[in-house]
Image: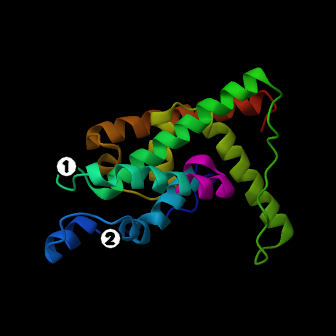
Amino acid sequence: MKGFFASRHQAVSVDIESVMQATGTPTLSLDQVYRQHAGDVTRWATRLTGNPDEALDITHEVFCVAQRRLSSFRPDSAKVSTWLFSITRNLINSRRRHQRLKERLFTPLDETSAEVPSAHRAPDEALHTARQAEQCYRVLDRLNEASRTVLVLFELEGYSGEQIAELTGTKVGTVWVRLHRAREQFLRQHRELEKAGQL
């Protein structure tokens, strides 16, 4: 598992709600939300899809949705990060359903990786890393949405159980149960793909 999830880091976000209370600002502006959370949204989308190019499109869509819904958002009922993560996750799930439908109705999409190796790494190391990432996301794609989300947030994003609970609107105990099951599912699916010669 560590071979797949070696790049954990702690995410830090600004608490806009605290800023609003301190300044007496009654409502949020899209510019304020974008400046403080665009990086988070892009990172979530990249991790959840495994595709940096698609993540940029999703980030744009997320803030288009946020712009339409901003007037109805109530900071006293939810954190901005939780709200944006929910929009991000819903858009990604919608895209995944649409993609699966296209794959059933038309020809399969090309699964080759479009990742460009970093100039700071040796070509063989970059290729190995790209293959690991491709294999990881091939396995993640076989997990259900809840398992995939908690695994990505914990293993790749480095969020704590408490942070994941806040982002996903669940209890901390539920997060740990889902994470345990997700790890088991990941390893099981990995073994099955290996056995089938698909990794």
Q: Is residue 52 magenta?
A: yes
Front one among 148 and 49 = 49
Q: Say which amino acid is labelled 2.
A: Val
Q: Tally the marks.
A: 2
Residue ID for mark 2:
14
Q: Say which amino acid is labelled 1.
A: Ser
Which x, y percent locates residue 124?
Answer: 85, 65
Which x, y percent locates residue 113?
Answer: 79, 51
Q: Quadrant of residue 117?
A: bottom right
Q: Residue at x 27, y 44 (%)?
A: 172
Front one among 104 and 179 = 104
Image quadrant occupied by the C terminus: top right
Front one among 67 and 172 = 67
Front one among 127 and 115 = 115
Q: Which mark is residue 77?
A: 1
Classify mark 1: helix, strand or loop: loop
Q: Which residues are magenta?
A: 48-59
Mark 1 neighbour density, 10 Å: few (under 14) some (14–19) many (20 or more): few
Q: Residue at x 66, y 45 (%)?
A: 136
The chosen color scheme is rainbow
Q: Residue at x 15, y 70 (%)?
A: 21
